Image: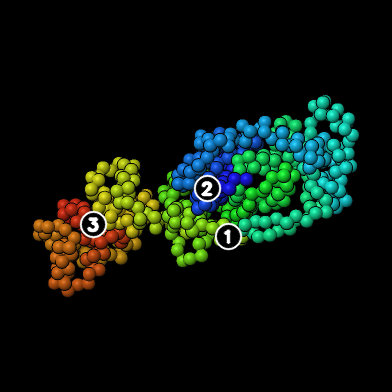
Amino acid sequence: MSSKVRVRFAPSPTGPLHIGGVRTALYNYLFAKKHNGDFVLRIEDTDQNRFVEGAEDYIIESLNWCGIPYDEGPGKEKGFGPYRQSERKDIYREYAEKLIESGNAYYAFDTADELDAHRKDHEEKGKTFIYNWHNREKLKNSLSLSKEEVQEKLDGDEPYVIRFKSPKDEILHLKDVIRGDMEIDTNILDDKVLFKSDGMPTYHLANIVDDHLMEITHVIRGEEWLPSLALHYMLYRAFGWEAPEFAHLPLILKPQGKGKLSKRDGEKMGFPVFPLEWKDPKSGETSAGYREDGYFSEAVVNMLAFLGWNPGTEQEFFELEELTKAFELERVHKGGAKFDPEKTKWFQQHYIQLADNDLLTEEFQKVLKKQEIEAETEYVHAVVDLIKERVVFVEDFWDQGYFFFIAPTSYEPKDSKKAWKEDTNELMSELIEVLKAQDEFEAEKLQNEVKSWIKSKEIGFGKVMMPLRIALVGALQGPDLYKIAEFVGKKETIKRIETAIETIH
């Protein structure tokens, strides 16, 4: 086996990549990069019935968007290809036959109906039917039939499968980097199908052969593969190959904590479970994606890294390079990790604060374009700078700052009632005169003048500031009022106060 660390991410192109899959890819990527190794992408498309058009491209685009591209795989050939299992079909038969020759596998000719009858018979007796050591010599296979009978069936193109011959009365000692040492009694294992007469291998055979031929040193995968570990270990042994190290990652759980996070949970609670938006080619149904929902890839990666792992320090924000240095498989938890949509938003808010204002200005300009608003880049940049700390997503710049671009067309009823009293119209008319007298319409000077005027009238600040905010914004929200007035300018400020006086009674 290669002394260089080589890991693989091996998804099936059966639809969009769930964020659980993205986390598996991320942990593989971090482990490979930490050890100066290779991160391989292999597409496991042996099940052609479930193949979905566009899914492979979606997987590749997702990895690239997350900033965790593969080093080797489709389109990045490095001498271990092809990297799609459907293009490796011819390889597997040879290995299945090797197992038969060594006595580790056998041909089985039982039909689906015959196996069904056995299952029903067992159920009636209150037992579970398992195809293994206790009954395989009574069933229709190359262990119970003569050599001639087997050859006759093969020559007659009778459908068959090749099954692995699980050993009897053995305790397997298995190791997992995350879960430690495990013991399995081989008597409870069934003889899994490895190969079918249509020329297609099952996942188990293809997986082991590919990992060996691609010189994979560490298999980092989801815990749903834990029940297959014994078989995979025995297959390595049967071939006389050195097994890679295994690490099975914990499940990502629903926000409530029970059960695996599903697409339905996201739909019900209003958060994506896919990295990118996905349009199902068959149903036309669209599923939300983190990218299209306005999340930064750094926020998604940071959130995913913490779903099942912690660095053992207080640090919560990690750039990809820092994650690579800090990541250790031994610090991955055994127990499931509860998904928290609010925590994802918290990471997003952090990364939007760190984002370059030029980039945010560019993105906000796209939002303004949708609103059919044209504004100078310099002005938009200044608005971004002023309200940045209030936003989580780029779209929020509009919700938090629409009043910098358009005058309010209505006024929040509750806020208006609270702010607009009997004497407010009179006070606002006086304020207009104060503002008209200002030559330099900038925040600090305005603040000094308006404050002096309010003090001279011996009234509370709220009597003026609240209705002024309603007039300029339409609600009791937004950043510094004097800044808003400076940004929209003298003429527009006065005009908005006049409109409010006419509208609110």
500 vs 213, left or right, is: left
27 lies above or below 50: below
Distance between the alpha carbons at the discs numbered 3 and 1: 53 Å
- The reply to whether dot 3 and dot 1 touch (C-beta < 8 Å) is no
**Residue type indicated by callout 1:** Glu
Name the N-terminal-most of marks 2 and 3: 2
Which residue in the protein does label 1 denote? 330
Judged from this view, the residue extending furthest toward the top is 156
Neighbours of disc 1 within 10 Å: few (<14), some (14-19), many (20+): some
Q: Of tags 3 and 1, which is closer to the observer?
A: 1
Distance between the alpha carbons at the discs numbered 1 and 2: 18 Å
Name the N-terminal-most of marks 3 and 1: 1
Residue 194 location (% of width, % of height) = 73, 40
Neighbours of disc 2 within 10 Å: few (<14), some (14-19), many (20+): some
Q: Is residue 267 visible?
A: no
**Residue type indicated by callout 3:** Ile
Which residue in the protein does label 2 denote? 37
Judged from this view, the residue extending furthest toward the front is 3
Q: Which mark is residue 484?
A: 3
Instruction: Label 1, secondary structure: give it.
Output: helix
Residue 9 location (% of width, % of height) = 57, 45
Residue 141 location (% of width, % of height) = 84, 37
Distance between the alpha carbons at the discs numbered 2 and 3: 53 Å
Q: Residue at x 22, y 72 (%)?
A: 460
Q: Residue at x 16, y 58 (%)?
A: 442
Q: Residue at x 53, y 45 (%)?
A: 39
Residue nearer the viewer, 84 or 294:
84
